[in-house]
Image: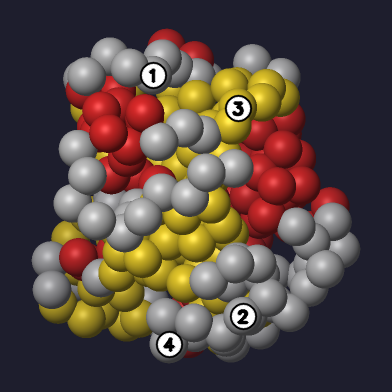
Amino acid sequence: MNKVQKTTLTPSQLQQLAHTTSRIGKFDICHFDELVSTQIYLLEMLKENKLQTPIAVITNEQSSGLGSRNNSWSGGEGNFFASIALNLDMLPEDLPFGSASIYFSFIMKQTLESLGENIWLKWPNDFYFNDDKIGGTITKKVNNTLVCGIGINLKKSQNGYRALQCDISAQKLLENYLLALEEFPKWKQIFREYEIEFELSRKFSVHIENDKKSLSDATLCEDGSLIIEGEKVFSLR
């Protein structure tokens, strides 16, 4: 693969630098050696109608990925940096849009479990191994398209978080995830399993509009939202 340098290249220039492509199930996959951000690249390509959904972008290295609360998620080869985009009408009809991050994240959690990794999902979008964060997701709606970026420390501890230190390749993880995702299980099915796992989140806190809130007494609602201190909050981020 040609290397995409960490510069202020335009989306058109990025595309011309060439990426290799493959296909798994319904998803086309664009592979890069290096990108500033898979999510930024995907959003720009969709905006210019140069890529069509359903699509996934994966890179070996990422220099300035988008994380929650405007944080950066970056790192070197071996870790997982990918973004996917699909039309909203592909999602199950019973999925509350505000809980899309739980939906996408929990399917990734299930995918990692199927590959032998024992992780869990902290509400709403953080992957944990025991008490240590190893990654997370971020979702963004653009017109009728949902873009989900996922970063996971598979091999190297980076971004202030530990790593799984597993033998799973980023490519294999993405392919398995896309195959699981395109089955599009009902929200009710995902929520039934996540409802049990949510209890692990209670000893942690979450940021709600820059305020840190304890999850110890939070009530998880069937639409994936929480009642915290009498306020209903959703998980979209």
Q: Nearer the viewer, mark 3 or mark 4?
A: 3
**Quadrant of res 29:** top right
The mark nearer the N terminus, 1 or 4, is 1
Near-viewer residue (12 or 168): 12
Secondary element type, mark 1: loop
Residue at point 48% right, 50% down?
Answer: 3
| Amino acid of disc 3 | Thr
Q: Does label 1 or label 2 sit earlier along the sequence?
A: 1
**In x, y percent, where is residue 5?**
36, 55
Query: Dots 2 and 3: beta carbons under 8 Å?
Result: no
- Sooner in the amino-acid sequence: mark 2 or mark 3: 3
Task: Tell which of 155 and 216 is nearer to you.
Answer: 155
Q: What residue would you read off at disc 1?
A: 51
Q: Position of residue 20 (x, y in %)?
A: 59, 31
Residue at 68 percent of width and 22 percent of height = 23
Residue at 68% from the left image edge and 54% from the top image edge = 170
Q: Quote the CA–CA distance across marks 2 and 3.
A: 26 Å
> What's the CA distance linking mark 4 and mark 2?
11 Å
Q: Nearer the viewer, mark 1 or mark 3?
A: 3
Of the residues shown, which amino acid type is indicated by label 1? Leu
| Residue identified by numbered label 3 | 21
How packed is label 3: few (under 14 Cα within 10 Å), some, or many (20 or more)? few
Q: Is residue 117 left or right of residue 208?
A: right
Q: Which residue is mark 2?
A: 156
Label 2 sits on a secondary structure element that is loop
